[in-house]
Amino acid sequence: MPQYQRILLAVDLTDESARVAQRAKALAASNSAELHAVHVIEPLSLAYGGDIPMDISSVQDQIHEQAKRHLGEFTKQNGLLEGHGHLIFGRPDSEIHRLADDLGADLIVVGSHGRHGLALLLGSTANGVLHGATCDVLAVRVGETSST
Amino acid sequence: MPQYQRILLAVDLTDESARVAQRAKALAASNSAELHAVHVIEPLSLAYGGDIPMDISSVQDQIHEQAKRHLGEFTKQNGLLEGHGHLIFGRPDSEIHRLADDLGADLIVVGSHGRHGLALLLGSTANGVLHGATCDVLAVRVGETSST
């Protein structure tokens, strides 16, 4: 009885993404579902409130290049199909929701630290993804609950 | 490759619980996992801020009896084992976390409306359950996103 047909795995591309990917892959396998991965690069101006007193375009470019390389490695390691890795620039929550809608995903899988705050930078929080999602959301617990 | 061994399904016992139960049962089946269900009755004094100018003990008793009956029907309908239906009185989020820890659950399944507020009464919100959970949380989308 397949429940899910298209699963979107949202990753911050830290070491913890491996654990989240493992869950998503197992679910995709048991549901014979299509698996996509997305990484959202949050603009530094958004992360810091739009008030940065310097030109950050080269820093942003470097972040983008590095993310592209890491996402490529990630999708390869996890056996994702060509074109199933998505790199997006914007606000994580809303971009993940938008892509999930575009793809027709019925499940979003995201890592969760059970905390607010810092995790937002270059990644996303399970909480933000949960609100406003039009499909199911699996929050995979990563790291220690007490860590920062 | 079983991922989950013990799944805790948190339900508000409304009609929408059937859909959430369906997801939880399918996951339990594909993982050969033990399935438990919990319904938390929130004390009226908590829900209304502790300032109710009347004796509400009989109302609270009626709510308890009705919830007990509904949970019994729910566990029976969903083929849960004897003793796997849990009725708890208290604050939903923390009671669900406590029971999940006590049972050694590795996944909590909860319905989510993608909204705050009213859903708290006699139930719980996926958001509250997500924060502070020490295991994975699957939020199953129920109802219309735009509904209240």
Image: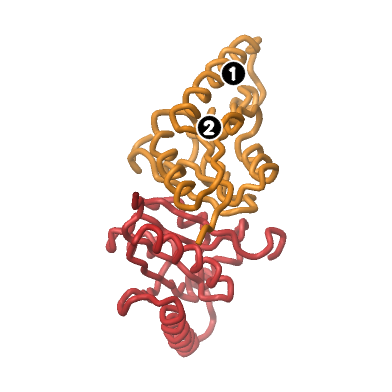
Chain colours: A orange, B red
Residue B1 in the figure: left or right of residue A118: left
- Relative image position of residue A118 (x, y in whole percent): 48, 32
Q: Please name the amino acid that badge 1 sits on.
A: His
Q: What's the distance in space between the residues labelled 1 and 2, CA to CA?
A: 13 Å
Residue B142 in the figure: left or right of residue A140: right
- Relative image position of residue A6 (x, y in whole percent): 58, 47
Disc 1 sits on a residue from what chain? A
Q: Please name the amino acid that badge 2 sits on.
A: Gly
Residue occupying image coordinates x 31% and y 79%: B82
- Using the image, tell me which numbered label, if any, was put on residue B71: none
Image: A57 above or below B148? above
Q: Residues within 10 Å of mark 2 (few under 14, many from 20)?
A: many
- Relative image position of residue B86 (x, y in whole percent): 36, 74
Label 2 element class: loop
Label 1 element class: helix
Image: B83 above or below B139? below
The answer to whether residue B5 shows anywhere in this view is yes
Q: Which quadrant: the C terminus of chain B? A: bottom right
Residue occupying image coordinates x 56% and y 54%: A136
Image: B142 above or below B127? below
- Relative image position of residue A23 (x, y in whole percent): 42, 45
The answer to whether residue B55 shows anywhere in this view is no
Q: How many marks?
A: 2
Residue occupying image coordinates x 43% and y 60%: B27
Q: Which numbered disc, 1 or 2, marks the residue that appears first in the sequence?
A: 1
Residue occupying image coordinates x 47% and y 32%: A79
Q: Which residue is mark 2?
A: A123
Residue B74 in the figure: left or right of residue B53: left
> Do callouts 1 and 2 mark residues in contact (Cβ within 8 Å)?
no
Quadrant of the image occupied by residue B81: bottom left
Disc 2 sits on a residue from what chain? A
Q: Which residue is mark 1?
A: A64
